[in-house]
Amino acid sequence: MPDATGLELIAQDLRASHPDAVLGTTFFREEATLEVAPARLLDAATQLHARGYSFLASCHGVDYYPAEPRLGVHYQLLDMPNVDRICLKARVGVEDPHVPSLCELWPGANHPEREVYDMFGVVFDGHPDLRRILMPEDYEGHPQRRDFPVGGEPVIFTYNEDKIPGWTR
Amino acid sequence: MELTREKLGGADDLRIRQLRARDMLRGDISDEELERYVEERVLTTTLDKAVAWARGNSLFPATFGLACCAIEMMSVVGARLDIARFGFEAFRASPRQADLLILSGRVSIKMAPVVRRIYDQMLEPRWAIAMGACCSSMGVFNNYALVPADKFMPIDVHVPGCPPRPEALMHGILKLRAKIQGDPPAGWRERYEAFGTEEVVGAADRPGVNAVNVFQSGETSGA
């Protein structure tokens, strides 16, 4: 991990090239997180990639409900020669959840981004094949959002099998 | 200790029976004697009962595992429990050859059409066992992703457990055998509205009740 100072230096470099890119930095329990504006995600990632964080270890979504903006996309980057990690984070609201795709930079982001799209409904602009990956294609809603009902069907027992729709009804 | 040797039955008895068999084949015995001869040697039953007996004792399960329950299903075939004792060991790799679908694990919404298709590809008569909590009541995965098996296909036996012990699955299969042997139609007459084909049609208000080839539920044979 970069230490707190290292994180600030990275943020400063990013601010120098893209003044509106950095929204904040967090250094919590030895984990450096760089929060960037969604529109500047690709620029920030490109810069970090050039800096040595050239391996995309993980990409996942978060729902911060009830905080706003609600949705977040996290990219865990790894600098393999220096064994250094940093988290790149972008937050978007549910009304217009658009984030640039990082597939150009890391082709391996393809499936994780599809999963984030599937589960949280974040739309990745520029993604080559943005379809649902886990849920059926005709599924409605994004099940990992906090306001999505946990669901669960009523359990069919002998006493209520006439009342619950089953295979024959 | 003194050993004595005795002939079983005795040579004369065997000779008499041989001669009677010869007479029988020649057509030389008749009437009461013939009647007794036949009674001693012939068992009568209905065709449905005989077929059900055979079906129940040789189920071919489909080789189809969904999740962790499948491991327990495999161990049922292994040496310790050895389902071959009952004649269910021939797991068929094609649904066309199988007549028992053991839903061993959770069925997700995306998997449900696949499972249903496999079930549809199996030939009648076919049975299905919902093994484990997930495909009966969705168990700990009672959320957006899963669907209980009863929603999209008929299930004959539910085996509870998470996962069920192999003994429990065995018990479930033996229950299914009892069901097959005791109630051979398994609802197909109702499903296809195939009334009027009974060998003996019963009372008008209760079709098929006295029919020869229609079994009352609860009537079991053997199991």
Image (cartoon, rainbow, N blue to C red):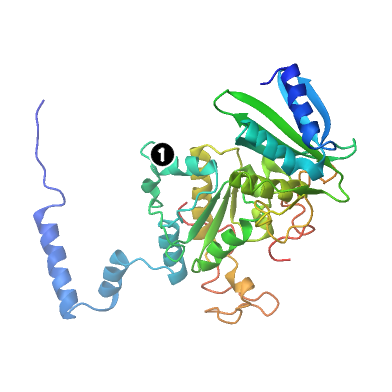
In this rendering, the count of numbered labels is 1
Q: Is residue A154 left or right of residue B178?
A: right
Q: Position of residue B43 (x, y in %)?
A: 35, 65
Quadrant of the drawing holding the N terminus of chain B? top left
Residue drawn at 19 percent across, 75 percent down: B24
Position of residue A53 relative to residue A39, above or below, is: above
Report the front residue among B91 and B53.
B91
Residue A37 occupies quadrant: top right
- Pointer 1 indicates a residue of which chain? B
The structure residue drawn at horizontal position 73% and vertical position 34%, both measured from the top left corner, is: A88
Secondary structure beneath dot 1 equals loop
- Does B16 appear above or below B69? below
Q: Horizontal and vertical percent for residue B175?
A: 53, 50
Picture coordinates of residue B11, whole percent (x, y): 9, 55
Is residue B144 visible to the viewer in this orientation of the structure?
no
Q: As rendered, which of B116 and A140 lies closer to the eye?
A: A140
Identify which residue, A156 or B22, lies in the foreground. A156
Q: Is residue A163 left or right of residue B27?
A: right
- What residue lies at 43% left-to-right and 40% top-to-bottom? B75
In the image, residue B167 above or below residue A131? above
- Left/right placement of residue A50 relative to residue A21 reads left
- Residue type at mark 1: give it: Leu
Residue named by callout 1 = B81
Residue A135: in sight, yes or no? Answer: yes
User: x%, y% of residue A44?
Assistant: 73, 38
Which of the two residues, A5 or B109, is positioned nearer the viewer here?
A5
